Image: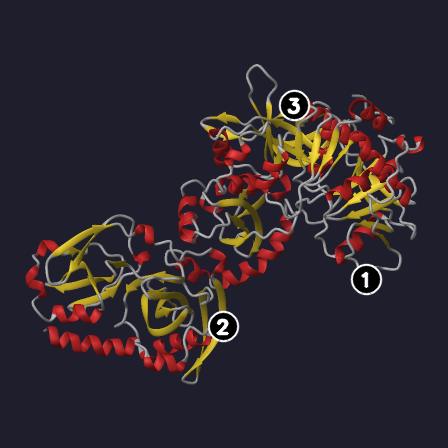
Amino acid sequence: MEVSEELIETVLNQWSDRVLIKTTDSSLSYSEFFKTAASFLEILDTEPGERVFLCSNDQFFLISALWALWMRKSVAVPVNPSLPKERVWPLMKGCGSRLLLTSKERFQEVPHEIRVMEPDPLQNVVSSKIPFDFKILQPQEPASIIFTSGSTGLPKGAVLSLANFCFSALGANQQMKLIPGDRWLLSIPLFHVGGLGVMFRCLLSGATMVIPASKQSWEDQLRQHSITHLSLVPTQLQRMIDQENVFLLKPLKLILLGGAAQSSQLIGRAQSLGLRLMTSYGSTEMSSQVATARPKRIHQTWTACGGVLPYREVRLAEDGEIMVRGQTRFLGYLEIEPDSSDSGELKLKKPFDAEGWFASGDLGQWIGNPGSEPLLKMKGRKDSMFISGGENIHPQEIEERLMEFPGILQAIVVPVQDLEYGQRPVAFLKFNETDDPSSVPFLDEASLIWDLRQILAPFQIPDLFLPLVLQENQLKPARSELSLEAQPVYDEWKKIKPLRQWLRERPPGWKKILTLRNKQVFKIIRLEGGKRSFLYVCANSRQEIMEKLTGDFNKLFDAKDWTEIRNSTHEQSDEEAYQIIRILADDLDKGRITVLTNLDHANSEEFDPSPLSSLFSMFPWEIKNILGLVCVEGNTFEYGFCAPELFPLPKTGFGQAVFQSGVWIPEWQRLYLLRCLFSIKNQKKQFLGWKVQSLKNLKNSKDFEHPIWEMNNLEEAVLEAIMMKHRIFSKDELEKANTPAKDRLRREKFGIQIN
């Protein structure tokens, strides 16, 4: 198809009566649509070259407005409707625009120089032919300004022509077969070149673009509209696969995957399910796609790469940067003249070399493709690379690894400033949304870091994991904005870094008490003849075990029934012949354990407690890092405190649960892992007592487990004051509950009885 000023006439001659636009309750043929657009343009009074902003969630409104403006030779500037108006006005001023078209009244206070219109594209639709003057287009002139998301956070206005969009669509349609009767779901917004690409690909092939209803689910859209082609970002595809909607994807002729890093695991899953998938690399500056192909398996790993499409040219610079040119290349960036008047005069900045090449800012490599042209693989952003401790860090390499973990939908790694290393990586993660935490295997920080150590260099492992929260219609957040968001969180984390790193193997939060046959599981540690051994038992309470130990309990067992403790990494107390410790589901290593299930008889049972350990799991960013001061006995102590919010309370069938937190006292150079026992019934809690589970002395690097005899009264008073300050319990609750001081008295009394 020829791209000329008579483009509309050419399209109508071929597809006039075919359906161009399909919505939930209506459809428009090619001729009906352009008549609608012609009626729309009569409402407008824009001038050729005038820049007009479009801000709406209504896709049909936007398509109509776009073509109405292009028929008037004006320049359309579609923007994200979720942008606050405080960001819209500066963008309009920067573009020299004074008119905004919207489909819904949302701009109450408007600067005096801005005019807002809310035209209805379906009002007064003419039945006559489109006026000849308006059918003549200017395909080589600026038609649209699309703001790039960019990695710098400063949006640039990429100026594109109708010819750019048309050649982009024509080249793409040669690689991705699209014929009359096919239906492409418009799942990408029209302020993004991906959405405009769908529109032009359908327009130039006689296919239909389907506009989804705003509140209609993906499943209903695919069922109702007989979709054949679908554009998705990796997060959307992962979610649809996880929600077991593969049966809706299998009939599709094509799923075009792009817009973000595509993990080999996701591609492999799609291939194994028989989905007709193509991966794509593109950019705003190249009017959408640059290279597209079916995924290629290289060294047993699925790789997202593509063949360069017609009407584009690609070469790699010496440093691996992707250089592009061709008929889809944008006209340039729009900038304000330094001496511009209030008329909004703008100039076009053309960042091209003498041969017309544009440096994309992306790094790439060629992948061999025997018998055909090599394929292009995008490796990451050149400007997103940063240096940490003298080592180059490429975020996309870490992101691809993170997205191989089940449950992680999207990962973005950004740098934060660090005095010691210069910069350090922080990862923003978006997890699969589910009501079943056990279906997401890697929620806790320790598991994530442990597995990353197997596949990444130590300097590549992120120091911090934060939630990735995307705005509506946002496909790629600006990395610089995420860096700014992460910096203060990292700075707080850095202040209590010793505590947070120590807690990675002991994550704070609600913990499940290990139970078997509706009884608690306890660990009895015995000191005899200078040797320690242990035994797991089921009991209703610690008191029940104490009564048995003072009786004939030991006569039931030989030495072989006790497991000797060898090479312990923790310091052990020599104060007690027996210690009775309540076991949490997180306390045990993976694997089966033997538990004495009846205290009156030597009946044992093996079971695997590991599936229970994730029942109360949480995301790493739910743990708050707090540095504060507390006053005890006339002295002020600085402390670090790590714990999530106490509420909501966990759901537990047993009726009791433990809340775990961490404390660091810099003055004493000690780290404490604290456990508070609560009774929980009908979502109401009762505080039962607290203890220090673990203690680390940073002065001599000694670790103590159950250090009740290594503590003093002042230490315990400071820890209690910190927990009360953070409302773990109140002073009245503490007086009625078990404390380390009360526990020592009980143990001393028990020691006298057993001896």
Q: SS class of the residue under badge 3?
A: loop
Q: Which residue is mark 2?
A: 628
Q: Residue at x 73, y 24 (%)?
A: 311
Asked whether 624 or 171 is in front, the reply is 171
Q: SS class of the residue under badge 1?
A: loop
User: Viewer-nearest of labels 3 and 2?
Assistant: 3
In this image, 515 relative to 241: left or right? left
Give how far apart the Cα atoms at labels 3 and 2 are. Answer: 63 Å
Q: Residue at x 77, y 28 (%)?
A: 166
Q: Which residue is mark 1?
A: 109
Q: Which residue is mark 3?
A: 177
Three-letter amino acid code at disc 3?
Lys
Relative vertical location of residue 250 with respect to residue 625 in this rendering, above or below: above
Give how far apart the Cα atoms at labels 2 and 1 are. Answer: 43 Å
Relative vertical location of residue 198 with respect to residue 216 in this rendering, above or below: above
Relative vertical location of residue 119 with respect to residue 618 in this rendering, above or below: above
